[in-house]
């Protein structure tokens, strides 16, 4: 990067003017000035600034020049290309850490399966009317492994005023195949996605821990195209942290949201229940990574293969959930 000029150190470009015509006080027309090639060859040190016919024009300051490629410009502040701010993430981790340790008391199994470097797609079962599993997973991996995690979610979050900006600064990225590809393939980052989507968080308490179909297997296809493994995570505890008792279709349509839940938390705490979770004990089990024996960067992959792999991953997470529930002594104490 060129050294910025110090105070009193002024740079000049020289522009030679033709003799002014009688009665003309305006600057010469562009076609009357010396070409840039000629100006660049002038010896500035040998010129007298007070000589007639010369005008000294301050050069643009180096920091205003935009000559470097986009990926080589020095980024001001700590906000990366995805909108994530590590300073804000550090604040969020400090604020959230007591909730993680003392409210949810999260315990992990199999963290060694999360890659220490390179891209990977983390997927998990999804639950709670206002999801509690995403912040637990992101916080746990970032504090235990010191690797940032980007959470892929519906664009609805990004579109909300203020909330959308805070969500992006905290590591949220709109869920789109191109975003996932760039994160994992180009940037070698960890991306977190929940294949159940809103169907997982919107299910009733009576249907807890029964996984919905993992969409059309898009998460498998993007992992294949990115050339990264899928790391499945089974989460127990989120279902009880904010269980949905019933849903209002009328309010959902009025607010233009996928569903409007009425939760046990709202009945217990009133309107404050929208932001207060029950202290359910969280247990998380990371399953072995799933690698795909297919070439990356293909436009299409066999639909039958994609759906088969997606169903296998769903079944593995479902079996892990059932196994963890069988050994759980209490919702509150694990």
Image (spheres, helix red, strand yellow):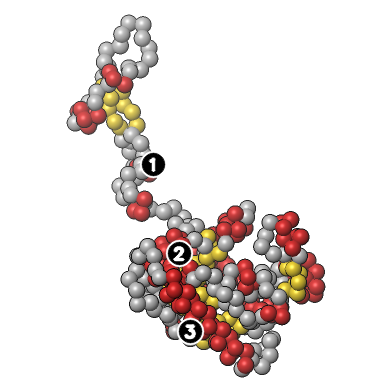
Of 157 and 309, the residue lying toward us: 309
Compare marks 1 and 2 and give the one earlier in the sequence. Answer: 1
Which one is in front in this view, the residue at disc 1 or the one at disc 2?
2
Q: Which x, y percent locates residue 39?
A: 23, 28
Whole-number angstrom distance, CA of label 1 to CA of label 2: 33 Å
Locate residue 75, reporting x and y percent: 41, 54
Side of 266 relative to 165 (left or right): right
Residue labelled with disc 1: 64
Front one among 58 and 76: 76
Mark 3 lies on residue: 287
Distance of mark 3 from mark 1, alpha carbons? 50 Å
| Residue 101 is at least partly visible in this image | no
Q: Is residue 8 above or below residue 332?
A: above
Q: Which residue is mark 2?
A: 180
Query: How many marks can you see?
Result: 3
Marks 3/2: CA–CA distance: 21 Å
């Amino acid at each position: 990067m060129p050294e910025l000029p110090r105070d009193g150190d002024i740079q000049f470009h020289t522009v030679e003017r033709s003799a002014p015509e009688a009665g003309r006080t305006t600057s010469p027309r562009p076609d009357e000035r010396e070409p840039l090639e000629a100006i660049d060859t002038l010896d500035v040190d040998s010129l007298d600034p007070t000589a007639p016919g010369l005008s000294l024009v301050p050069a643009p300051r180096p920091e205003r020049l935009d000559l470097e490629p986009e990926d080589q410009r020095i980024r001001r502040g700590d906000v990366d290309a995805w909108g994530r701010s590590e300073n804000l993430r550090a604040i969020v981790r400090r604020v959230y850490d007591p909730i993680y340790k003392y409210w949810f008391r999260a315990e992990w199994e199999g963290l060694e399966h999360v890659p220490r470097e390179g891209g990977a797609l983390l997927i998990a079962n999804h639950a709670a009317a206002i999801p509690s599993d995403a912040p637990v997973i992101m916080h746990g991996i970032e504090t235990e492994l010191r690797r940032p995690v980007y959470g892929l979610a519906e664009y609805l979050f990004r579109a909300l005023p203020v909330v959308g900006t805070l969500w992006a600064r905290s590591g949220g990225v709109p869920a789109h195949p191109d975003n996932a590809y760039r994160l994992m393939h180009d940037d070698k980052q960890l991306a977190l996605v929940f294949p159940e989507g809103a169907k997982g968080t919107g299910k009733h308490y009576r249907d807890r821990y029964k996984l919905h179909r993992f969409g059309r297997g898009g998460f498998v296809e993007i992992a294949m195209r990115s050339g990264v493994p899928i790391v499945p995570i089974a989460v127990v505890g989120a279902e009880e942290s904010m269980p949905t008792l019933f849903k209002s279709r009328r309010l959902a349509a009025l607010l233009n949201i996928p569903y409007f839940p009425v939760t046990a938390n709202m009945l217990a705490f009133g309107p404050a229940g929208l932001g207060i979770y029950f202290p359910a004990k969280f247990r998380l089990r990371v399953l072995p990574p799933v690698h795909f024996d297919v070439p990356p960067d293909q436009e299409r992959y066999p639909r039958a293969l994609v759906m088969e792999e997606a169903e296998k991953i769903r079944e593995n997470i479902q079996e892990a959930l059932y196994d963890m529930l069988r050994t759980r002594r209490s919702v509150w104490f694990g």
